[in-house]
Amino acid sequence: MKKCLDFLKKYAKYILIGLVTGMANGLFGSGGGTIAVPAMVLLLGAGEHKAHATAISIILPLTMVSAFFYATNNYVDWPLTFKVILGGVVGGYIGAKLLNICPPNMLRKVFAVFMILAAFRMIL
C-alpha cells in the first residue's frame, strides 16, 4: 500500500494532466493539446517545443480510443472524414516543420492567440 501511495505522490501531476487531457479529448473530440501543452509548460517545466511535440504524441493514443468509441456508435461521418483527412495530413506535416523553425516565445504567443480565438468562437 505504501508503494502505491508513493507512486501516486510521485506521479500525481502526470496522472492528473493525462486524465484531464484524455477527458477533454474524449468529450470534445479534440482539444487535449490546449490542456496538455500549458500543463506541461507551467506544471512540469517543459520547454515550448517539447511540450507541443509531446502533446501530439500523447493525443494520438487518446484520439484512437475516442475515435473507436465514436465509430462504434455511428457518430462518424465517413465521407466527410475522408475528404478532410488529406488536408489534415498535409497540414500536420507543415505544422511540424514550422515548429522546428518557430522561436519558443513566438510559438507561445501564436498558441495563445489560437486558444483565445477558439474560445471566442465557442462563446459566440
Image: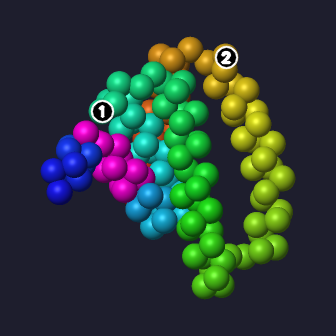
* Separation of marks 2 and 1 at Cα, in angstroms: 25 Å
Instruction: Please state which of the two labelled residues, at mark 2 or mark 1, is closer to the viewer.
Output: 1
Q: Residue furthest bottom?
A: 73
Residue 44: image location, x then y, percent: 34, 30
| Residue at image mark 1 | 43
**22 left or right of 91 in image:** left
**Residue type of the residue flagged with mark 1:** Leu
Residue nearest the observer in this picture, 70 or 117: 70
Read off the residue under disc 2. Answer: 101
Tell me which secondary structure the magenta stretch mostly adopts: helix
Residue plotted at (35% across, 25% down): 45
Label ID, residue 109: none
> Callout 1: helix, strand or loop?
loop
| Residue 67 is at least partly visible in this image | yes
State the residue at coordinates (76%, 36%).
93
> Does residue 19 belong to the magenta stretch?
yes
Residue at coordinates 44% horizontally, 33% vertically from top-left?
A: 112
